[in-house]
Image (spheres, grey):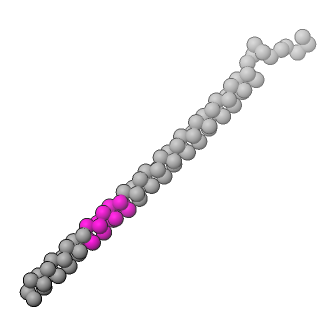
Amino acid sequence: MPLFVLLVASLVLLHRRQHARSSRNEANLRISRDRANLDLHLQVHANEVMRKELSERSSSREGLEAQGKEDDPAKQQEPGR
């Protein structure tokens, strides 16, 4: 009888240890997944900001070039010619 109790107690302890280890692994995987998801969102946001800045720069550059062509005295004609 005491040997049987010892065997059952060791099996219970082993099961609890395995359960704690698997719970810890699941928690680590969840944290890792959440961290990767956050990194992805940060990268997407950074790309959107850069794309917006580049489009604003190119549109302002095009506007300045168009404005420069209108103000270019070499391209303007004198009245009567």
For the point 32% across and 61% down, which residue is it? 28
- Residue 43, relative to residue 68: is it above or below? below
Q: Is residue 26 magenta?
A: yes
Please report the residue visible at 21 percent of the width from the left and 71 percent of the height from the top.
17
Find out whether residue 77 is within the magenta segment.
Answer: no
Q: Is residue 18 above or below residue 64?
A: below
| Snapshot quadrant of residue 81 | top right
Extreme residue toward the bottom, this view: 1
In the depicted view, which residue is nearer to us: 35 or 8? Answer: 8
Residue at the far top in the pictured view: 81
Residue 51, percent from left and from top:
57, 40
Q: Quadrant of residue 48?
A: top right
Tell me which segment is drawn in magenta. 19-31
Total of numbered circles in the picture? 0
Residue in view at x 30 percent, y 69 percent? 23
Q: Position of residue 27 (x, y in %)?
A: 33, 65
Q: Residue at x 68, y 25 (%)?
A: 65
Give left or right: position of 49 versus 73.
left
User: Residue most toward the right?
Assistant: 80
User: Looking at the picture, how far across and down is residue 59, in whole percent?
Assistant: 66, 34
Would residue 4 appear left or right of 73 to someone viewing this image? left
- Report the side of 13 relative to 22 (left or right): left
Instruction: Please identify the dominant SS of the magenta region.
Output: helix
Does 53 sit above or below residue 21? above
Q: Position of residue 57 (x, y in %)?
A: 60, 34
Q: Nearest the camera: 64 or 29?
A: 29
Which of the pair 68/5 is nearer the observer?
A: 5
> Going by the picture, which residue comes out furthest to the left?
2
Indicate the quadrant where residue 53 lies.
top right
For the N terminus, the image quarter is bottom left
